[in-house]
Image: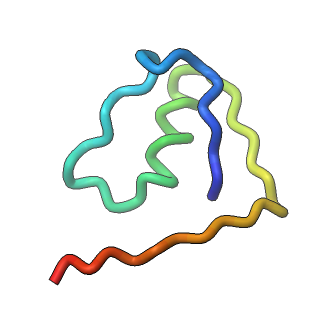
Amino acid sequence: MIYRDLTAANDMPDLPEDIILDDVWVPSIQRLKKKRVVLETEAIAWDTALNDG
């Protein structure tokens, strides 16, 4: 999911350190704050896996 937060930077709390699904957490927090969340089905994103081992 690609998201764009159009609100002020201080409107978004810091991500919890143990978060696994930030792409679920971020829009959920926005909706709890009564913010509008729009999903774009044709968005394209590239992600790089972390080498944490």
Number of numbered discs overlaid on the protein picture = 0
Q: Where residue 26 sits in the image (x, y, percent)? A: 48, 42
20 versus 35 height, above or below: below
On screen, residue 23 versus residue 10, left or right, reads right
Q: Where residue 9 sits in the image (x, y, percent)? A: 47, 20
Please state, as top left, top right, bottom left or bottom right, where the N terminus lies in the image.
bottom right
Q: Nearer the viewer, residue 45 or 15?
A: 45
4 versus 13 height, above or below: below
Identified at 84% across, 63% down, the residue is 42
Toward which corner of the image does residue 41 lie, by quadrant? bottom right
Extreme bottom residue here? 53
Please state, as top left, top right, bottom left or bottom right, where the C terminus lies in the image.
bottom left
48 versus 9 height, above or below: below
Identified at 31% across, 40% down, the residue is 15
Identified at 20% across, 77% down, the residue is 52
Q: Where residue 46 sits in the image (x, y, percent)? A: 60, 70
19 versus 42 height, above or below: above
On screen, residue 1 versus residue 10, left or right, reads right
Extreme left residue here? 53
Q: Nearer the viewer, residue 43 or 51?
A: 51
